[in-house]
Amino acid sequence: MKGTLMLSWILIICLSQVAVRSQYYSDTLPYHPRPPKVTNLHFFMHEHTGVTAVVLTQANITSNNSSVPFATLVAVNDPLRTGPEPDSEVIGNVQGISLLAGSNASSTQYIEFGFNTGKFNGSSLSVFSRGEPGLAVVGGRGRFMMATGTALFNPILINATNVIMEFNVTVVHY
């Protein structure tokens, strides 16, 4: 018993000396964060009902008299253009889903603005928000890495077959 206790103390002393005399190997590098950039974007989304926006599923509610049925899930794949004209330059597309869940045609949306021309070619912005006048930008990739911001929209044209929305997007990214 006395020998075991003595051996234990010797091991503890030796191990503590090893820990004190050795150094953890690491090179400490200074942290230099990239300065945040603020980018303002202006573009138009052109949606054609039944072509670029398709109803995936809808709740079977017979008492709904709304033009936009409650509990409807819609998939979108709309072109982004530089202007409201149908022949304006295509700069990307919007892909995502929209859940129409309110009695006043409000929606919750997950959409991604993907850019395939110009300075932001290959970059995208992710938006997840309720369909109020401003949508929350919650991320991005490419030039919009770690993006946050807001996407304000203004309906230009809404009829039975077409929707044209103007977007003013302010993004803070690195």
Image (tube, rainbow, N blue to C red):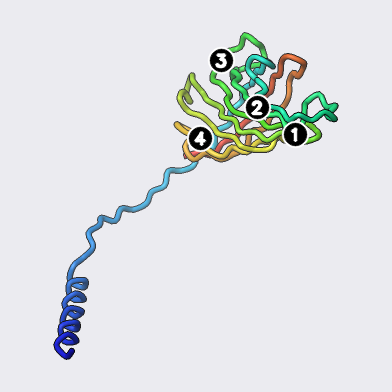
Q: Amino acid at mark 2?
A: Phe
**Vertical side of 22 occupied by 124: above or below:** above
Residue at 63% of width from left, 17% of height from top? 52
99 vs 142, nearest the viewer: 99
Q: CA distance from mark 3 to mark 1?
A: 28 Å
Instruction: Residue under label 2, please give it.
Output: 167
Instruction: Please state if 30 lies on the left or on the right of 43 as rendered.
Output: left
Residue at 61% of width from left, 19% of height from top? 78
Q: CA distance from mark 2 to mark 1?
A: 18 Å
Q: Which mark is residue 106?
A: 1
Q: CA distance from mark 1 to mark 4?
A: 25 Å
**Vertical side of 46 occupied by 147: above or below:** below
Q: CA distance from mark 2 to mark 4?
A: 17 Å
Which of pointers 3 and 2 lies earlier in the amino acid sequence? Answer: 3
Disc number lying in front (2 or 1): 1
Q: Amino acid at mark 4?
A: Gly
Instruction: Give neighbour class at mark 4: few <14, some 14-19, many 20+ (Cα, 10 Å).
Output: many
Residue at 48% of width from left, 25% of height from top? 120
Instruction: Residue under label 3, please give it.
Output: 90
Where residue 97 sits, quadrant-wise, is: top right
Q: Amino acid at mark 1?
A: Ser
Q: Which mark is residue 74?
A: none
Instruction: Residue under label 4, please give it.
Output: 140
Which of pointers 1 and 4 lies earlier in the amino acid sequence? Answer: 1
Secondary structure at numbered mark 1: loop
Q: Residue 54's x, y, as percent?
A: 65, 20
Disc number lying in front (2 or 4): 4
Secondary structure at numbered mark 4: strand
Where residue 45 sits, quadrant-wise, is: top right
